[in-house]
């Protein structure tokens, strides 16, 4: 299964400049269409980087798509000890949901089950109201709900303007901030990589994801950052809101009337990007295009495309030619 | 542009004066002549500002003295007959050169009050926010509650470089109180919550009836209250957060390090028992 924000091949009909190729890889004259979401950043610290990452991996597990997981989440980056609120090594994670209510629910559940339970961890809000470029939304409960686990032994502590909760647990105290600031964010940026075979598709996708992960404020929520089951809206079956994107399935090249694939395309993979701002998503897509196209046609990457709904549903449009305008590589 | 209004004492009135209406922001909106005509309560009597103070205005103020304030009010040659300085202050910057009387920063909710001298009793009493600094000593009931009131200080930061009198932070509920010197009897008594740091020695009956909150002691006390128990371990993350938050405050609190974990005692078991005394030495 995959997400409902689709790669819908027949929809990208808006006017675009002439054909663009970088290192022999065709950049389609199309755009990715993205949507408003609510998001937050959490800072998880622990006694060692490994335990912070254990908690982060657990918290961001089963969070590939809002359709079936409630939220989309991923590890943003590791933090050295000097950059965390308590001076211990940490990890930042980003969570995205379709509404403030759902985001708050997911934060409380996931922190309660995955961070509170993990040895030595503490968790703090990671959105700075003064420096955030994303519009601020509201505050989601963090420790204010989890404190009840303390069964009356929990301690509230105000340090400056921030309230923390100290909940006694078996390895000491679980410390967490009372609330986490949330922002209005952007979800659903995407790239579709069309390759000669699965080896080439994987190599291009892995290179693109690696380049994107070097950037702040974005996550690629699917396994390894990559999704193979791109979907389209609707289905022949009643009750199914989404189904396989037959336009990009190589086994349906001669069968589907909507197929977008030429005979030489043997494998297609998609990368979905959620970011705190549209600028962040655009920067990540540019980095992804650059890394993938850097391998070029010689490595088997034939085309780079994107999914959209014809521009009618999402307010954020990321045109591939514009994103790729400043990239290096031989042009055609 | 930053504006500075200066009230320099020229004639001590011979009685106590209520200065609660002399606040930075309201005075910034008034002309010097209007300020001089202000009437101040003085017990059962009244007095005129112009009779006591020489009032001056400086539009191009020294911003280094009030880097975050649009309006600054300065008392020069202040003496302990000046009560309620900065009472119910909400914003601006108030500087006192000299000593103040009682109720300095009473129910103060914001802004900065800097007293370069001693302060009387009830300093920061029922303070709600902002920052109050006393470079000298303060009297009794600092950060406490008025008689009969349920809550003392509920927010902000009170820093006393010297000694504090008795009943420091009585019934305090929230905020930070730091005393560089000694504290009198019943320090942190009936504490509901909040953080209190004491750099010197303590008087008798400290932490009496302490329900919650944190009492930080830079020196090991002669004895611990009998209703406190060993508080265990495992609070190193909280300690790290606390130490980092104190880094901008006065010594010795700013010099504490996360690596040196204090000894923790929990109590007062006669009441809620969720308070803590952290002995850093």
Image (spheres, rainbow, N blue to C red):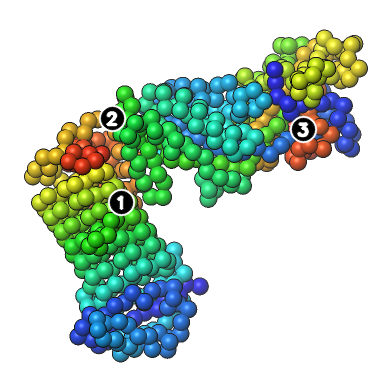
Q: In this view, does B107 lie above or below B261?
A: below
Q: Is residue A47 above or below residue B120?
A: above
Pointer 2 residue: B234
Q: Nearer the viewer, mark 2 or mark 1?
A: 1
The foreground one among B43 and B142 is B43
Q: Are marks 2 and 1 on the same chain?
A: yes
The foreground one among B279 and B41 is B41
Is tag 2's residue or tag 1's residue first in the polypeptide sequence? 1
Q: Which of marks 1 and 3 is in front?
A: 1
Residue in the image at 59% along x and 39% along y? A100
Query: In the rendering, at what x and y percent does residue A53 appear?
Result: 47, 24
Query: Which chain does the numbered disc 3 sit on?
Result: A
Q: Distance between the residues labelled 3 and 2?
A: 49 Å
- Mark linked to residue B173: 1
| Label 2 Cα crowd, 10 Å radius (few <14 / some 14-19 / many 20+) | some
Residue A156 seen in this snapshot = yes
Quarter-of-image position of residue A85: top left
Q: Is mark 2 on a helix, strand or loop?
A: loop
Q: Distance between the residues labelled 2 and 1?
A: 25 Å
Query: In the rendering, at what x and y percent does residue A30 appear?
Result: 83, 32
């Amino acid at each position: 299964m995959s997400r409902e924000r689709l790669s819908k091949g027949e929809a990208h009909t808006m006017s675009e400049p002439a054909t663009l190729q970088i290192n022999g890889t065709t950049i389609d004259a199309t755009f990715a269409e993205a949507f408003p979401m609510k998001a937050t950043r959490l800072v998880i610290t622990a006694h060692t980087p490994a335990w912070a990452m254990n908690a982060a991996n657990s918290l961001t597990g089963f969070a590939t798509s809002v359709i079936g997981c409630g939220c989309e989440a991923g590890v943003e980056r590791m933090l050295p000890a000097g950059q965390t609120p308590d001076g211990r090594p940490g990890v930042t994670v980003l969570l995205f949901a379709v509404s403030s209510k759902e985001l708050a629910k997911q934060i409380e559940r996931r922190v309660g089950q995955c961070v509170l339970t993990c040895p030595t961890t503490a968790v703090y809000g990671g959105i700075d109201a003064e420096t955030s470029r994303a519009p601020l939304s509201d505050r989601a409960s963090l420790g204010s709900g989890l404190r009840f686990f303390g069964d009356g032994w929990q301690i509230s502590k105000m340090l400056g303007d921030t309230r923390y909760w100290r909940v006694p647990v078996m390895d000491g105290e679980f410390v967490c901030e009372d609330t986490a600031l949330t922002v209005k964010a952007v979800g659903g940026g995407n790239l579709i990589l069309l390759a000669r075979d699965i080896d080439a598709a994987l190599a291009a996708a892995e290179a693109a994801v690696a380049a994107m992960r070097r950037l702040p404020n974005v996550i690629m929520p699917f396994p390894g950052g990559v999704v193979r089951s791109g979907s389209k809206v609707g289905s022949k079956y009643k009750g199914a809101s989404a189904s396989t994107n037959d336009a990009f399935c190589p086994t349906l090249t001669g069968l589907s009337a909507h197929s977008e694939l030429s005979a030489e395309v043997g494998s297609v993979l998609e990368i979905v990007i959620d970011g705190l701002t549209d600028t962040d998503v655009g920067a990540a897509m540019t980095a992804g295009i650059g890394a993938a196209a850097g391998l070029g046609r010689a490595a088997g990457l034939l085309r780079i495309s994107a999914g959209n709904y014809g521009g009618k549903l999402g307010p954020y449009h990321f045109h591939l030619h514009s994103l790729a305008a400043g990239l290096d590589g031989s042009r055609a | 542009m930053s504006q500075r209004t200066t009230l320099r004492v020229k004639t001590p009135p011979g009685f106590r004066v209520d200065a609660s209406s002399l606040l930075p922001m309201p005075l910034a909106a008034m002309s010097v002549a209007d300020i001089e005509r202000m009437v101040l309560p003085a017990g059962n009597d009244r007095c005129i500002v112009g009779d006591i103070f020489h009032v001056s205005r400086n539009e191009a103020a020294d911003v280094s003295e009030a880097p975050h304030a649009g309006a600054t009010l300065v008392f020069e040659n202040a003496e302990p007959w000046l009560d309620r300085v900065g009472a119910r202050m909400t914003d601006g910057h108030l500087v006192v050169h000299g000593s103040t009387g009682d109720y300095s920063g009473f129910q103060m909710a914001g802004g900065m009050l800097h007293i370069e001298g001693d302060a009387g009793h009830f300093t920061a009493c029922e303070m709600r926010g902002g920052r109050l600094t006393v470079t000298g000593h303060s009297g009794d009931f600092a950060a406490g509650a008025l008689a009969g009131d349920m809550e003392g200080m509920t927010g902000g930061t009170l820093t006393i470089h010297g000694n504090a009198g008795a009943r420091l932070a009585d019934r305090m509920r929230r905020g930070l109180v730091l005393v560089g010197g000694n504290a009198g009897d019943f320090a942190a008594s009936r504490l509901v919550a909040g953080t209190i740091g004491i750099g010197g020695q303590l008087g008798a009956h400290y932490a009496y009836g302490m329900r919650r909150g944190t009492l930080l002691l830079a020196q090991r006390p002669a004895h611990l209250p009998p209703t406190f128990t060993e508080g265990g371990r495992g609070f190193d993350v909280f300690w790290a957060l606390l130490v980092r938050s104190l880094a901008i405050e006065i010594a010795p609190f700013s010099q504490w390090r996360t690596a040196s974990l204090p000894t923790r005692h929990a109590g007062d078991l006669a009441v809620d028992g969720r308070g803590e005394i952290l002995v850093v030495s």
